[in-house]
Amino acid sequence: MAHSLPMEIPVSYTDIIAKADQTISQNANWDGISAESVARMQLQNRFKTGLDIAKYTAKIMREDMAAYDADPANYTQSLGCWHGFIGQQKLISIKKHFGTTKRRYLYLSGWMIAALRSDFGPLPDQSMHEKTSVPALIEELYTFLRQADARELGMLFRDLDAARKAGDEVTAKQVQAKIDNYETHVVPIIADIDAGFGNAEATYLLAKKMIEAGACALQIENQVSDEKQCGHQDGKVTVPHEDFLAKIRAIRYAFMELGVEDGIIVARTDSLGAGLTKQIAYTREAGDIGDQYNSFLDCEEVTEVGHGDVLISRDGKLLKPKRLPSNLYQFRAGTGEDRCVLDCITSLQNGADLLWIETEKPHIGQIGGMVSRIREVIPNAKLVYNNSPSFNWTLNFRQQVFDAWTEAGKDVSGYDRAKLMSVDYDNSELAAEADERIRTFQADAAREAGIFHHLITLPTYHTAALSTDNLAKEYFGDAGMLGYVKGVQRQEIRQGIACVKHQNMSGSDIGDDHKEYFAGEAALKAAGEHNTMNQFAA
């Protein structure tokens, strides 16, 4: 079922034409304006602002969250993007292969912005890139998705004109029905705001820019802004809960101020792999949230105060937290899961909607164990999960199968656990079972570990590198031009990739339509007899 349209104008094509005709008829000097052309342009530009998009997509996400609560088989998915064209092509492919965009989103990765979109050049994922590049990419993604709508609707309008010209009323009605029930390429974007790029006020200001650009869901992590690291690297430093909750509230205020009252906040905890904190939490009384945070610190009991010591008091004892030369404090080893659970519960109790637990491996048992503990307090807690390219999926799952077989008493003497990535095992029974577990991981984790949304953060970073390597190897090698023709263009033709007609994809035909609206028979159009795109008509 197509998503409802964010339009104040009537949704039927004929009704839109009629309304435009009424407006034109009230202005005697507008005789050169075609009501049907106006209707077409309005349909091709349904979303007037980023806030229109944020409100529309927030409603979709809320409906999808409710559907997941009713049945975990209704989990959602997305892929990360670093350019508007990449996001556009994903949605075009989704509509082509599956007929609907339902439960399929886009993810905007801070890692990819840092690596690919910074004026400083490639950067690590440490919040050193320009924060304005984040809302700029959101706006760019939605510009390309709206253009995909305009392109596809333009092709339907041409089909409608052709059917009318041929006197084929049946086809004309069928095409008009497709226009009336058109499903947009515009889908929710879950956007990475890192650790907020500063204090709570900075988080609020950036959140507003991201929402105004169209983001309905913002993901924020509990690391220190000026010490931020990629979630899959070492050296992560977390903040006390009150600091993080202030940023969650700042984002909620931003959503409310801009009228996106059902905007979604994804609270991410990096505590599983973070062994450090920059601050000792403020505490008012024993057992409060600050005291719970401090209880995880690696401390030793002291009887006297040394020079420069920082001490905390607990149960009548003086404790000295372990402080490193970096002036950071260290948590006790083995407390990561407990800290994650506390992070998640407090975030959901203070305005977050979804959770993100950054893990070091894709292991359903590990994730599900933490979610079970969270759900003892928050029964409908659910996760966004990073199906990260930072994991060696092949090795991880082969080792999981190896361990399961060992526990079950199955003979594993033909395998070396440390070398399971070897190509020698690719056709083995163990590899086949591991691949099947990878294939069903998302559905299994949605059912058993509370994961509502599965995403891959950096897929197109890797696909771009892989496809470029293959092309360069062929084109600059013996294959020459055949390397491009056979490996790229012929595959585009055989697989029906819309971009083989790159002039059409770039908007040339939309421009021709506008020229005809504006100039009539005098229009100088690009899609004439000598346009080489006609070679791809078949």
Image: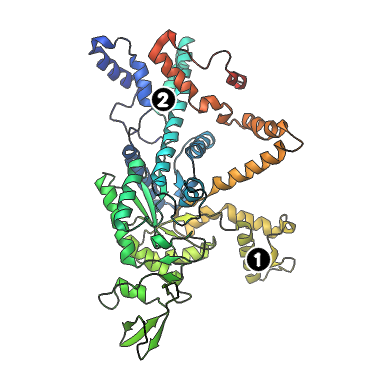
Q: Is residue 454 above or below residue 379?
A: above
Name the residue rendered at 42%, 16% in the picture: 515
- Left or right, 50 with reference to 152: left
Tell me which amino acid carries mark 1. Phe
Q: Nearer the viewer, residue 89 or 69?
A: 89
Q: Position of residue 528 (x, y in %)?
A: 54, 14
To which residue does mark 2 refer?
179
* Label 2 secondary element: helix
> Relative to residue 459, is residue 169 depicted above or below?
above
Q: Is residue 253 left or right of residue 169?
A: left
**Picture coordinates of residue 349 (x, y %)?**
31, 62
Asked whether residue 295 is in view, the answer is yes
Extreme residue toward the bottom, this view: 303
Q: Is residue 251 visible?
A: no
Disc on res. 402: 1
Indicate the secondary structure of the residue bearing disc 1.
helix
Residue 351 appears in which quarter of the rendering? bottom left
